[in-house]
Amino acid sequence: MKPFTNEETLDPENWEHYRQTAHTMIDDMINYLRDVRQRPVWQPTSASSKELLSEPLGNEPETIDEIYEQFKDNILPFTLGNIHPAFWGWVCGNGSATGMLADMLASGMNPSPSFGDHADIYVEQQVIDWMKQVFKLSPDSSGLLTTGASAANLIALAVARNSHQKKVREKGLKNSDKTLTLYASTETHSCIQKAVELLGIGSEHLRKIDVDENYQIRIDLLVEAIKKDRADGYQPFCVVGNAGTVNTGAIDDLNQLAKIAQEENLWFHVDGAFGITPKILPEFDEILKGSESADSLAFDFHKWFYVNYDVACILIKDKSKHEEAFAVKANYLLKHERGIIAGPGNFHHLGLELTRGFRALKVWMMLKENGLSKYQRMIRQNLKQAQYLCWFINENNDLELVAPVPLNIVCFRFNPGGMEDEELNLLNKEILMQLHEQGIAAPSFTLLNNKYALRVAITNHRSVNEDFKLLIEEVVRIGEQQLMGAKIN
Ligand SMILES: *Cc1c(COP(=O)(O)O)cnc(C)c1O
C-alpha cells in the first residue's frame, strides 16, 4: 500500500492567527469577570439565540472566529448568573479568574488522573491530603474528587452499603435476608434519596426523621426508629448527618450522631456539601464537632470554596472498604513495575469513572493562591453578611425571617401583616420572579412549613453589604407595588 497524502489533524492551520483569537478570548473573559457587576444578574435567553441553538449540525466547518462570535452573541449573555455579586440562589459558587485559567491549563494538558504515574495524579492526591488535614480526618483516609456532592454522596453510600452486605457485589441485594435501612433528617438533600434509589436500597428504606424547630434531626426519634427497625427485622446500616442543610443551613448534632452510629454499628456519613467549609474556622470547632469521626464526608469545592464548576470530594476513613466497593481487575489496567502504569494512581478503583478530568488543578491553584487565611476571611465575611441581612429583616416591619440562621442561608418573606399564608406565598413568589426578570438579584426560594420563603444562600465572594441592602429595598418596593396593584384592580 502506498502511504497516503493530505493527512489532517484538528490543530489550527495557522497557529499565529489562532494565538490572536485566543488572546482576544482571554482578554474578553477577564473583562467579563471584571465588569460582572455592571450586567443584570440574569436575563432570558433571546429568541434568536434559541433559534441558533436549535439548528441541526452542519456538514461544513466554521472558523474559530465565526464560532467565537456566535458564542459571544448567543451564549455568553444568557447565563445562569451565579458569578454575579447579587446571585444567592440554591447553593451556587462564583468560581474565580484563577479557576478559569486553571481549567484552560488542565484542558490543555488533558490528562486523565485515573491510574499510573503522572503529575496530575499527585496533584489530586495532594488536594485530598490537604482536605483530610483541614477537616481533621485520619491521614490514612482515602479520597476522590467528583463532579459534585451528589456523586460524592453516592460513592459514600455505596461503600457504606457494601461494608454491611459483604456479598452484594457478587450476589446483588436480593441475596440478603434482611432489608437495609438508613436514617437521615427530613431536611436531607434530595441527592441522598437518589443515591439510595440507584443503589437498590429503595427510598422507602431511607427513614426520614423529623426535625426540631431548628431544622436539626430529632435524636430521640432517630433512636426510636433504629430500635423499631431492628425489632421488625430490618438491618439498619447507615446514618446520614447534615453539616448544613440545603433549606436553612441547619447543622445536625454530629457528635451525637457519631456516638449513636458507633453504638449501633452504623456507617456514619456526613453530607457537608457547603456547610462543612466553616470547619476551617476555629469558632466552628464545637458546632461541627463529630464530623471528624465520620466514616465518610462529602463536600463541594464548587460551592463554599468558590471553585469553578464542577468539582467536589469524597473522603472515606477506611481505605480498604473504599477500594472493596469499586476496584475491579482488568487485564488492560494491571500495574507494572515501571513506565506510565507504575506509580500510585488508583483513582479508578475508588469510584464509578475510569477516564476523569483534571479538575484537581483548579482546586490546587485556588487553595494555594488564597491560602487558608484568605479562605477563613471570606467564609467569615459571608457569615457576617447573613447576619447583616437578618438585621435588615428584623428592622423592617414588612419583612419576616422564616427560619433561624445558623450559617449562611437566610429565609425570609415580605409580610406586611393581615394576609393569610396562601396569599403571602403567591405574593412572595411574584416578588422572586420579578427580582429575576428585572435582573436585580437572584435569591431562590423554598417552602418551610408551607410558607414560601425567599432564600438567600451566601456562597458568593463578590457580594458586598450594599448588595444586601439593595435586595431588601427591592423586595419591599416590588412587594408594595404588588399590593397597590391589587388594590387598584
Ligand atoms: C448542593 C448540595 C448537594 C448536591 O451537591 P451537587 O454538587 O449539586 O451535586 C448535596 N447536599 C447538600 C446539602 C447540598 O447543598
Image (spheres, grey):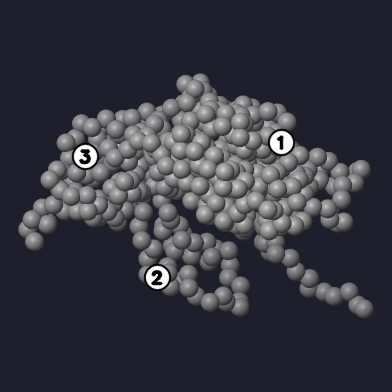
Label 2 or label 3, whichever comes before in sequence order = 2
Kindly identify the amino acid type of the residue bearing the numbered disc 2: Ser
- The quarter of the image holding the N terminus is bottom right
> Can the viewer see residue 113?
no
Residue to which mark 3 is pinned: 399
Image coords of residue 257 (percent x, y): 54, 32
Query: Which residue occupies 67% across, 38% down?
Result: 316
Disc 2: residue Cβ within 8 A of ligand 1's nearest atom: no
- Tell us which disc is closer to us: 1 or 3: 1
- The quarter of the image holding the C terminus is bottom left
Query: Which of 55/23 is in front?
Result: 55
Q: Quadrant of residue 346?
A: top right
Left or right: where 320 falls relative to 446 = right
Query: Which residue occupies 40% across, 70% down?
Result: 48
Image coords of residue 7 (percent x, y): 79, 71
Query: Which labelled disc corresponds to residue 318?
Result: 1
Determine the CA span between mark 1 and mark 3: 48 Å
* Mark 3 residue crowding within 10 angstroms, few (<14) / some (14–19) / many (20+): many
Dot 3 falls on a residue whose secondary structure is: strand
Position above or below: 57 against 432? below
Left or right: where 452 falls relative to 240 = left
Query: Which residue occupies 35% across, 42% down?
Result: 456
Label 1 or label 3, whichever comes before in sequence order = 1
* Mark 1 residue crowding within 10 angstroms, few (<14) / some (14–19) / many (20+): some
Image coords of residue 41 (percent x, y): 36, 50
Query: Which of 82/300 is in front?
Result: 300
Whether residues under marks 2 and 3 lie with C-beta atoms below 8 angstroms apart, the answer is no
Label 1 or label 2, whichever comes before in sequence order = 2
Query: Which labelled disc corresponds to residue 48?
Result: 2
Determine the CA span between mark 1 and mark 2: 53 Å
Residue placed farthest to the front in the image? 231
> Can the viewer see residue 46?
yes
